[in-house]
Image (tube, rainbow, N blue to C red):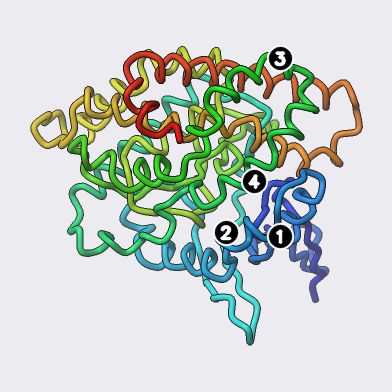
Amino acid sequence: MFEITFSDVSDGQGFFSAVLRFIIIFTDSKTDFYTTILKIPGTASFRKANSKSGGNNEIFEAVANVASIHKHECDFYSEIASILDIPIPKVYKTVELTSEHEGCIHMEDLTILGKTMSYFESVNLTQIKCLIQKLAHMHKRLLETDESKWKNKFMKHRKGFSEITTFFGDLVEPFLQKCKRREAFEPFLEKYRKFAFNKDYMIYVHQQSYQDFGLKSVIVHGDIKSGNILFAIDSHGDLQNEIAAIIDWQVLREGSPMYDLAYFLAHNADGVVRRQAETFAIEYYYKCLVKEFNGDETKVPYTIEQLQKDYNYVFLTQAFFIPFLAVFMFNGIECKIKNQEIKDAFFDFITLKSIHAFEDADRLLTKEMKDVFEKYNY
């Protein structure tokens, strides 16, 4: 005989799926139990958070076809996950979502090995190095693998945020009201609103810029924020620096080797940590890639200069969206936070992080990337 209980462990961040942890307790034993995870596609969490944000459901869900996104992740686990050789959940079975039946991904329970961080916490420099090591290893595996196994198979999400820029545009005013620093943001928004929400620039960076810079494509996670990374925990349940697993491969695609790094630093590090990381991150990635190729630098198909240039292009696709994504993310976790002072501190954190990102975007667009601003500011 056994008893089954379950709980949602997505912590308010599973906007296009419910992540349920099942505990099976065998009643004839006080110590014998089994845990597992079911990931079930759906938009209930998204709609709940969005109802508080002022965002447009129709715009977002018009491009976020849940069945298609779920199939994309199922294909990832069945076709190329093993190639990457990085920490990801072991998947036992995938079931596609159709009009006839529910979809799901049945996977191992990694909550006993790691925890995620919220959008309102910053990673540290050592955690950043750990992620860079994983990215370099993943990219090396792809670069040495027969391209026919993955090339041109994951193209669905190559427009990135471009299809939902209007959705983020709707969140500008809610953010300005909540952050209480309107005067700090309005000059930037007045100058860069057209550029920030320019779909053509978004599409160019996601699909073409890295190729123009001579960079070979890789598989990109596409949403590698800290809520999709399980950092290892110690025996007390406290976060460590090592990565236990990278999860949520729903929007993976083929793209730039710098996309995940720029996305990760923009969304997961506060301004102080990100700026410190940017002084070494790209060179460190390059050194890790050389090490992956057993020290043979001739096998690395990139230069640091190429990587830096494309990093800057990708950063500009994310920098202006940080505060507006924060509004949405905040509404997903706000109900779980009872202390008003903590809520205020969370939003103060994201406000300063956003100011730093806007300042750095402004520096790029008024100096070395001034021509890019002039080309796409319409």
Write the residue at 51% across / 57% down: 250
Q: Give the amino acid at mark 1.
A: Leu
User: Residue at position x 25%, y 50% from top?
Assistant: 142
Foreground pick, 181 / 97: 181
Most foreground residue, 231 or 359: 359
Q: Are marks 3 and 4 in contact (CB under 8 Å)?
A: no
The amino acid sitting under disc 3 is Glu
Q: CA distance from mark 2 to mark 4?
A: 10 Å
Secondary structure, mark 3, is helix
Circle 1 SS class: strand
Give the labeled residue for mark 2.
Answer: 108
Q: Dot 4 corresponds to which residue?
A: 112
Alpha carbon distance from label 2 to label 1: 11 Å
**Disc 1 to disc 4, how far (Cα)?**
14 Å
Tell me the SS state at disc 4.
loop
10 Å neighbourhood of mark 1: few (<14), some, or many (≥20)? some
